[in-house]
Image: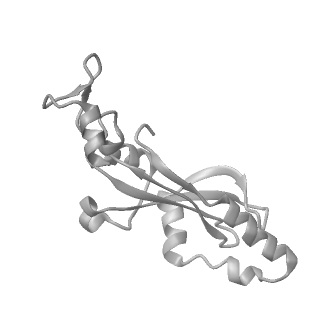
Amino acid sequence: MRTQRQIVDYSLRKRAVLRELLAGRVGTYDLCDASPYLKNAARFHGEPTDRRCPICRSENLTHVHYIYGDELKQSAGQARTVAELAVLAMTLREFQVFVVEVCPGCDWNHLVEQYLLGRDGLAGGDGEPEHEATGMTADGTGVRRRREAQR
């Protein structure tokens, strides 16, 4: 998505957890503990992937996108599809997305990544459109002056 920024990838943490499992320091019952709410969100709002579950290796993983932000009000904490995220990214200033992978077979679940979406990630930096030829925003102030003020 165009406005995706401040991405945090949790793949190193996932590898560490799987290494702990293979070493026998943690059991599958500790890792495969998806709640019924998470499994329902995966079923109805999840995006299927082509990656196999690292635990049972029989099912493909599903990604569930949870959204949080001040502008969301009652919608905060809900699971949304990728198509809905694109629409929200163009209508809201900023919100946070958490991506969780879920296995429908063995209930494995793990936080994959988190990132920000919203209009604040567009060219002007503050949600206002930037005039490409002049480098000016709609109200006539320069982009450089605004960025310096934010520091």
- 123 sits left or right of 62 in the view: left
Q: Residue at x 45, y 46 (%)?
A: 5
Task: Name the spot of residue 3 as percent of width and height, x first.
Answer: 40, 41
- Image quadrant where residue 20 sits: bottom right
- 134 sits left or right of 45 in the view: left
Task: Name the spot of residue 116 as percent of width and height, x first.
Answer: 42, 52
- 89 sits left or right of 63 in the view: left
* Residue at far top of view: 133
Task: Name the spot of residue 83 as percent of width and height, x first.
Answer: 42, 44
Instruction: Please identify the quadrant where the N terminus is shown.
Output: top left
- 146 sits left or right of 98 in the view: left
* Residue at far right of view: 23
- Image quadrant where residue 121 sits: top left
Q: Residue at x 34, y 33 (%)?
A: 123
- Asked if 135 appears above or below 16 in the picture, the reply is above
Q: Residue at x 13, y 32 (%)?
A: 139
